[in-house]
Image (cartoon, rainbow, N blue to C red):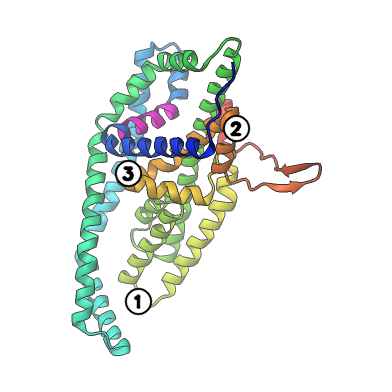
Amino acid sequence: MQIKQYPFYLKTTVILFGITLLIYAMFTLGDILVPLIFAMIVGILLNPLCNRLQRAGLPRVIAIIVTLLIAIIVLGGLLYFLSSQIAMFGESLPLLKKKFTELSGQLSNYLQNRFGISFKKQMEWVNQARSSGTGMLTNTLGSAVGTIGLLFIIPVYIFLFLFYKPLILNFIYEVFSEENSAPVVADILKQTKMAIQSYMVGLLLEALIVAILNSSALLILGVQYAILLGVIGALLNMIPYIGGIIAIALPLLIATITKDGFQTQVGILAAYLLIQFIDNNILVPRIVSSKVQINALISIVVVLLGNAMWGVAGMFLSIPLVAILKIIFDRIDDLKPWGKLLGDEVPTKGKGQLFQRNKKKASVAEKMVSKT
């Protein structure tokens, strides 16, 4: 039977229409999809612990409940630590506000004397920035409050994902397996699961190390709220490029308000640039999954797209979601070109073949997951 070939422009139009329809559906169903995706990612991370408890003799339901309790205790400890740091920051807020007002007055006088910008014109700029910033802050806070509210339903989703894991895997197996291809489907599922787990474990390890480096540098420089700023910087570092800029701006702002001169600011800038260099050239290649690196262009585009669709939650979810897609694309022959497009391996001409790539060694996270 001859397969009908459609023209390129028609296939491209159908693909673009499908992508547009998918993005619109994801935007419309954001309130439902965001907690489900969070639960799926956390469930993949907790799955090895749940399996270990089951092998230790615990019934399936009890093992899932114990796994969730451990995760909640760890998350609760982290939130308690951050809340205590934020409480300390709140106690100094009046002093910071006073210092900020003084610096704003000095800056306003400098702009008028140096560039001839009147106070009236400056106030117009401030009001415009305040009105636009208020809308952005409202959207951000609304997204954050919504995310906090979802924390109560996410554990339920995680429990159900872990409980119905055999049913979900069996569904995928039966849908995609064909005659004599069962071993191939099973191998793809196994490799995809291990790659996703290693990527997420590596991402958490990277965030922990970056938080320690940030906090240590700020403590040495004598910046107030060093630990809080270091942890926030590590969390923002999960958002490529955009998060790194905000992570540097926060301690610079605090140092400007609380300290005289600019020596501390120069030290912060130098320390954070050094930490970014260590993170990009040592931590990410050796700790995070070496097979799931996303190139800079795709990273920026998907972060902005995630923010447009789901706000702050979308910015944090965008990179893990694209990483999962790359993992799947790399293991399906027809989708391998798309996986290469998402990756950061730039093809180079080599002897004996058109393109040649250096094989990457297994990362720390991949070795941890393979052992467990």
**Bounds of the magenta segment:** 34-46
Amino acid type shown at disc 2: Lys
Residue where numbered disc 2 is placed: 367
* As drawn, 77 above or below 91: above
Judging depth in this view, the residue of 62 and 295 nearest the camera is 295
Q: Position of residue 332 (x, y in %)?
A: 57, 27
* Nearest to viewer (mark 3 / mark 2): 3
Q: Is residue 311 left or right of residue 351?
A: left
Cα separation, mark 1 vs mark 3, equals 41 Å
Q: Position of residue 277 (x, y in %)?
A: 55, 57
* As drawn, 192 above or below 19: above
Residue where numbered disc 3 is placed: 309
Q: Residue at x 51, y 56 (%)?
A: 276
At label 3, counting other C-alpha atoms closer than 10 Å, the crowd grade (few under 14, some 14-19, many 20 or more) is some
The reply to whether discs 1 and 2 touch (Cβ–Cβ < 8 Å) is: no
Amino acid type shown at disc 1: Asp
Q: Quadrant of the C terminus?
A: top right
Residue where numbered disc 1 is placed: 260
At label 1, counting other C-alpha atoms closer than 10 Å, the crowd grade (few under 14, some 14-19, many 20 or more) is few
Q: Residue at x 44, y 27 (%)?
A: 44
Q: Earlier in the sequence, mark 3 or mark 2?
A: 3
